[in-house]
Amino acid sequence: MRLRALGVALAATAALITLPATHPSAAAAGFPLSPSRTATSSSAENVFGTTAASACGTDNAAKGKPASASSTENAGTPASAAFDGDPGTRWSSEWSDPQWVQVDLGSVQDLCKVDLSWEAAYGKDFQIQASTDGQKWNTLKSVTGASGGTASYDVSGSGRYVRINGTARGTGYGYSLWEVAVHTGSSGSTPPVEGGGDLGPNVIVVDPSTPNLQQKFDQVFAQQESNQFGSGRYQFLLKPGTYNNINAQIGFYTSISGLGLNPDDTKINGDITVDAGWFNGNATQNFWRSAENLAVRPVNGDDRWAVAQAAPFRRIHVQGGLNLAPNGYGWASGGYIADSKIDGTVGPYSQQQWYTRDSSVGGWTNGVWNMTFTGVQGAPATDFATGSYTTLDTTPVSREKPFLYLDGSTYKVFVPAKRTNARGVSWPANAGTSLPLDQFYVVKPGATAATINAALDQGLNLLVTPGVYHLNQTLNVNRANTVVLGLGLATFVPDNGIDAMHVADVDGVKLAGFLIDAGSANSDTLLRIGQPGSTADHSANPTSMQDVFIRIGGAGPGLATNSVVVNSNNVLIDHTWMWRADHGSGVGWNTNRADYGLVVNGNDVLATGLFVEHYNKYDVLWNGERGRTIFFQNEKAYDAPNAAAITHDGIVGYAAYKVADSVNTHEAWGLGSYCNYTSDPTIVQAHGFQVPVKSGIKLHDILVISLGGQGQYAHVVNSTGAPTSGTSTVPSKITQFP
């Protein structure tokens, strides 16, 4: 209980001294008992608002729903007591103005009436408000001069959250409500979007007894092995159990995941294989596929996962070793492992670079150019000066990707909790929360952007099943803690020059597991997180994007000025590949023009596993303060026609990673940029990295490489670092800047 401020009149102070620890009930105080007063409005109070919709329900939609308040008088008067259906329990606030109490209805509802049953300490002036996201509030009723008791107010509007916002108390005490009842009805508009349901035609759910299981894997692989720019999208979901003699070969746009809560719940005595036979043993184009949340015991001791970018290996227990190179040890350009346990040795062999986070390995054989580890038990020690390793003992902030699982026979999505200074896997402890599937709109082929937005407005999360979804309006994620989870590399294509997705500046949005493919008309920004000028602190519950991939061109002409713009603070970027295509269809210096890959305007943003390639200007432009990047892989645009086309401010070439001159604090580890100027091999790029020279700017373990002599770098960072030269593809590197 909070006492009122000093300095009140002497008589009031004397009265306060005689008050009990909690103020008396209505009867003891001499007030009429609350149930004896009933009103819809009275001549003594003024009510401003619209009238109710027809067909108002009699049920109390707020009963038993989650509640919160600006304050409580003591532990015996919680916010939940105003929504528990018990007229003998109450919420009461501290003794000050303003105060509020609110309830979460679980989804957006049409609101038609609100009943208030006040205790003796009532609100004289207050508003009844509604919100779809718990952040922006619309006033449905403004009430002044109320006199307490029980009153019913007709309202008209919609919202997931309903708030009673008190601005003036009717007594010297706080605000106290026995009950708040919320009634809902139909406004005659489009029926609500339903959550839950089946997982659509491109999700293949199997168990150990599924007939011809190997044949199912083989059929999908035969279709997807070389289908680099096709429209096929598939997700294999394996129910918990033991699968024997399986070799699941994973092609383009194919994902394989276990449905247990822990990886060891789903065991494969066999292999999950990615190789490069389709491309003559060259694995540098093994993009867009994934494996997650299962255990594998390889037949010959080592599992082969020879991938390039956008091919995450998450939450896997390899009961043996892991080979990251293709058969024959051809070229390879990956890659990403997180939250995984490899009992044996990891052999990268021909892999150029790799990032591993919050995992454990039995050993690591070698590195080529840039092998970065954070929070990895068994990782090799840093040796970047003479080798390729950069190792941090822990990961500063991480949160594992949400995933679908079975609780008995019920689908749920597990949302892991944020970890700080993590080391090793997150399981089997599994801190986090489970969300039932009925809290998700299951997006299936044929779904429209309007329906997806309606589902978001209702407060539903999104589970986007495999498919290619053309958008004729921007998807707007406005509610805090919304989960947007894709399966099987679900793909959004914005048409007619719109942006694909906007995320509001709210807490805890989780974006994971989907691809945004630019449309043929130029979009300004494919994915925007936070509105311009966002300032809120989200450190306790940051928004995250994980395995969210961007493509411009390759499947056809694509245009976008910016791929991803982060305006919110504290965002976690955990494994992304932003790629302006260098091959495929619709490829050319202006045909698939994209000036900027990642633009960071927010403060305290952390990127772990950042792959950004081939943009016309800066691949990464970092304007926010206190940004951090752990592992960065880049190639400059192959198709720059000549040096003049990329010269700016007297500098030849846009840096792969540019920290704005205004920034005072920034730090990054394990950074690499490569040039392959095939259109004009005479180009000499000034540097791979450009940062202000200030005490708070620190780069660790940075390299640049000329791929086969197709263009060169003059320096590594600013004017520091030796130039590259010749055709031998030897990196120029520095271990510390400045």
Image (spheres, rainbow, N blue to C red):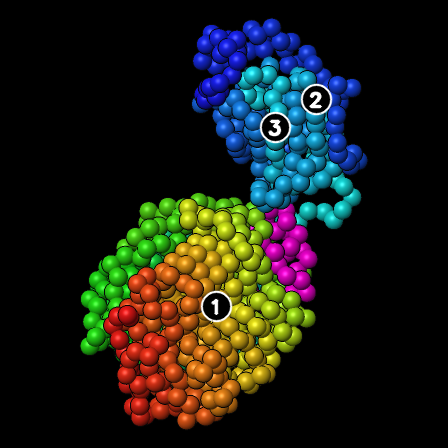
Q: Which mark is residue 166?
A: 3
Q: Amino acid at mark 1?
A: Leu
**Badge 3 element:** strand
Question: Is residue 475 in the magenta section?
Answer: yes
Q: Nearer the viewer, residue 394 or 403?
A: 394
Q: Which residue is mark 2?
A: 145
Q: Which mark is residue 75?
A: none
User: Along the polypeptide, which appears first: circle 1 or circle 2?
Assistant: 2
Q: Residue 214: name its quadrant.
A: bottom left
Q: Is residue 441 above or below residue 523?
A: above
Residue 21 position, x and y percent, is 45, 13
Magenta region, residue range:
449-477
**Badge 1 element:** strand
Q: State the residue at coordinates (49%, 25%).
A: 72
User: Along the polypeptide, which appears first: circle 3 or circle 2?
Assistant: 2
Residue 181 position, x and y percent, is 64, 27
Q: CA distance from mark 1 to mark 3?
A: 44 Å
Label 2 Cα crowd, 10 Å radius (few <14 / some 14-19 / many 20+)? some
Q: Residue 357: name its quadrant.
A: bottom left
Classify residue 734 as left or right of residue 430: left
Classify residue 130 as left or right of residue 606: right
**Badge 2 element:** loop
Mark 1 in CB contact with mark 3 (< 8 angstroms) = no
Label 1 Cα crowd, 10 Å radius (few <14 / some 14-19 / many 20+)? many
Q: Nearer the viewer, residue 510 or 61?
A: 510
Q: CA distance from mark 1 to mark 2?
A: 53 Å
Q: Which mark is residue 598?
A: 1
Q: Residue 139: name its quadrant.
A: top right
Residue 38 position, x and y percent, is 72, 17
